[in-house]
Amino acid sequence: MTRRDLSVLFPGQGSQALGMLGALAAVHSGVRATFDEASAAIDLDLWALSQDGPEAELNRTMNTQPALLAAGVAVWRAWRAAGGAEPTAMAGHSLGEYTALVCADAISLADATRLVRERGRLMQEAVPEGVGAMAAVLNADLAILTEVCAQVSTDAEPVVPANLNAPGQIVLSGSAAALDRALAVLAERGVKRSIRLPVSVPSHSPLMRGAAERLADYLLQVPIIAPRIPVIHNADVTAHTNADAIRAALTLQLHAPVRWIETIEKLAANGASHALECGPGKVLTGMVKRIAPAIAGQAIGEPAGLRPCGAVGRPGAPGCAVEPRPT
């Protein structure tokens, strides 16, 4: 059954953690089966990596991306196996967009696992270690951040607002040197709260253009069909049905901002009153609360998330999950 007021969201990098989905796997055998399916596509034991590490290997971009893809798909499958409703729309944050396309039956899990593994490799190789950087800036207006980034950027050393996550939470990405300059200027202008992210890949910045060009070539080899459920894309806040348009959106996403605020606002405008976060953690649930408080968010990466409804509706209502059971 489909719930017209339900949307499903998939997280991106930063949500991974050693032991993720361990509790859910204990009650849903499909979790391990999904990881095994993804692992076979790239000849890498993603379940062992996600449970036992080493953590440094899990956090390597080319490993993180397939691991989180498998995690998101596993939670989605557990939700459906537990009797959960089908949504009328999906969206994913950065990498999560690929997870959404798998769960919407636009790309097979095997093809997507190979795709995001390659995406991660291209991203890692695009910029030498130490050249790129990212930082979350808190309680700053987008217009000010855009102005300052333009002021301190050069062609060789760009920095841009990259992840428009929520009101008061915007991530800057690009050259480490330009980022230093931007944070210094912002501090002079009274914007002093920032958090440097422990990453070396400047995602969603102009420094990813070369990687995006190579990703576009790889995408031509990947079979893509129209999603069965609309997927709102990060870069243009649009749901595409044409395979070439989807490829173009995925390519653009790599070097363009993640327009997450607009994405959630669009889901709300289209009637979403409930949102499920399919994956480890609850980062997106927190963002939804800040962007659209009227949307009730629920993270379902733990067994408790699949018990009768919680924030998703009253127990027994159409589309609510039932108690977890082995699947």
Image (spheres, rainbow, N blue to C red):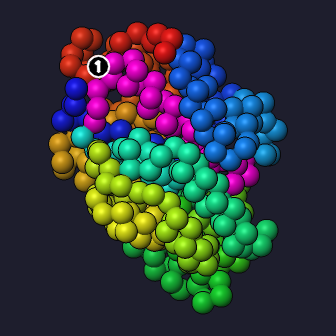
Q: Classify 159 as above or below 237.
A: below
Q: Tag 1's secondary structure?
A: loop
Q: What segment carries the magenta color?
A: 58-87
**Residue at image point 31% right, 54% down:** 226
Q: Residue at x 66, y 76 (%)?
A: 175
The amino acid pointed to by label 1 is Cys
On the rendered structure, is 120 left or right of 215? right
Q: Is residue 36 visible?
A: yes
Quadrant of the rendered structure where residue 215 is? Answer: bottom right
The verdict on residue 52 being magenta is no
In-front residue for pair 154/115: 115
**Res. 296 image quadrant:** top left
Quadrant of the rendering where the N terminus is positioned: top left
Q: In this orientation, which residue lies closer to the viewer: 18 or 322?
A: 322
Image location (x, y in percent) of residue 269: 19, 50
Q: Is residue 161 above or below residue 10?
A: below
- Position of residue 20 measured from the top left corner of the image (x, y, whole percent): 63, 30
Q: Which residue is mark 1?
A: 320
Q: Position of residue 301 (x, y in %)?
A: 51, 27
**Residue sitting at x 44%, y 29%:** 77
In this rendering, the count of numbered labels is: 1
